Image (cartoon, rainbow, N blue to C red):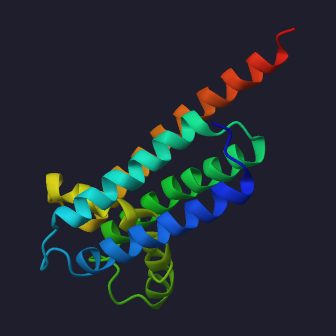
Amino acid sequence: MNMTTKKYIPLFFVLLIISIMLNGWPAGIYPDGSIGIVQILTSIGWFAFLMGSILILKNTSLIRFLFNYLRFGFIGGMVVYLITLFENHLWDQTWFDIMSGIQYPLYVLFVVPMFGWNAFTAIPYGDFSFLIGFLYLLIAFGLSLRYKKIKIESLRY
């Protein structure tokens, strides 16, 4: 199945928005709230979509698009983790408060769609962001291996 740009990009953003909407409330109030089956299934669905994209995508621009999302997901997870790591020590520093404002959009875009997985780990959101960042890194690694295989196959005569 060859996925075109006109189909994949809207599907990507619709699924991302749905994942954020369904996981947003529990992720925002965690650990006071609970993670239910809807959040777990949503996160499994988003993960399956990302993994399936590795197998389906053959268009170079779509592969780059997904790779960039995964790359920024890794960076975003690490930024959220580092900010939560130092927030107790630098609580009253103005520059740190400004820097910590960066973590919220990164958290929403990259960690919240996968937040249902935290039902199995039950760890603070900063530590969970660290794990999700590395999960994005592993998916990006798989995507790069797939991309290299596609390039090699296209060079065969």
Q: In the image, 127: left or right of 144?
A: left
Please identify the residue farthest to the front as the structure is shown.
1
Residue 51 percent across, percent down from the top left: 47, 41
Please identify the residue farthest to the right as the structure is shown.
157
Image label count = 0
Q: Nearer the viewer, residue 157 or 91?
A: 157
Task: Identify the residue shown where x is 48% and y is 66%.
Answer: 16
Q: In the image, 103: left or right of 45?
A: right
Residue 105 percent across, percent down from the top left: 49, 77
85 in relation to 145, above or below: below
Residue 125 percent across, percent down from the top left: 27, 67
Task: Identify the residue shown where x is 33% and y is 77%.
Answer: 24
Q: In the image, 30: left or right of 6?
A: left
In the picture, residue 69 is in which quadrant?
Answer: bottom right
Task: Identify the residue shown where x is 39% and y is 67%.
Answer: 19
* Image quadrant in which the C terminus is located: top right
126 in relation to 87, above or below: above
Q: Nearer the viewer, residue 51 or 128?
A: 51
Residue 130 percent across, percent down from the top left: 35, 55
Task: Identify the residue shown where x is 44% and y is 87%.
Answer: 97
Please identify the residue farthest to the top as the structure is shown.
157
